[in-house]
Amino acid sequence: MRRLSVIILFATGIVAGCYAQNNVESKKQFAMKMNAGIITEKIQETKAFYQEKLGFGVTFENEFYLLMHTPGHEAQLSFLLPEHPTQQPLFQPKFMGEGMYLTIEVDDVDELYNKLKSEGVKIEIDIRDEPWGDRHFAIKDPNGIGIDLVKYTAQN
């Protein structure tokens, strides 16, 4: 895995749509970085999964929060304990395991597929080529989040 980058499609679409709608009259550009946050009781299992299976590193960690980064530091993903007293109500309910996915682009999807399969990671969608050019497969993390691992191919 030479390069991993997390693409959070739903959030990117929301941010882009809100920015475009709210910025019609203004030409000012805002620098933005983004990381998706998942509220989960399974922080230690999640940390082990992303480190051992996908090569993520830990950017920051305390007793209730974990911030991880892809191997090349291109993107980050965070995890927060539910119902933590330091957090506002918006950030307290735990993720219920549905309605979210991550797309992680990799340089060699076949190599990663073979690695994960040999390690006994359950493959949710077997490796395949799509008519639009993607080659990908899917797994789930300990929180039930679908992870689409993909190699994009330019279409002619």
Image (cartoon, rainbow, N blue to C red):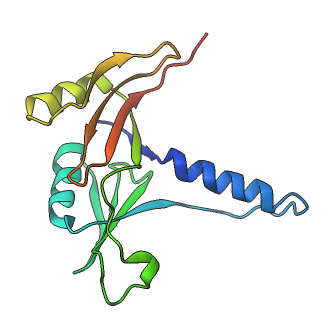
Where on the picture, by quarter, is residue 147?
A: top left
Residue 101 image-quadrant placement: top left
Residue at x-position 46% and y-position 60%? 35
Task: Give the residue at x 61% y 48%.
Answer: 13
**Figure check: 95 above or below 117:** below
1 or 81, nearer to the observer: 81
Q: Is residue 134 left or right of residue 41?
A: right
Horizontal side of residue 62 vs 87, given as left or right: left
**x%, y% of residue 122?**
15, 34
Q: Is residue 65 above or below residue 103?
A: below
- Quadrant of the rendering where the C terminus is positioned: top right
Q: Quadrant of residue 65?
A: bottom left
Residue occupying image coordinates x 33% and y 26% = 108
Furthest-bottom residue in this view: 85
Q: Position of residue 3 (x, y in %)?
A: 37, 39
| Residue sitting nearer the eye, 40 or 98 | 98
Q: Is residue 17 above or below residue 87?
A: above
Please state the horizontal and vertical placement of residue 153, each as a whole percent of the image. Answer: 49, 19
Q: Farthest residue in the right direction?
A: 25
Nearer-the-camera pick, 91 or 48: 91
- Single out the residue that lies furthest toward the top: 156
Residue 114 vs residue 107, the one in the foreground: 114
Q: Residue 46, position in %: x, y?
A: 21, 58
Quadrant that contains the N terminus: top left
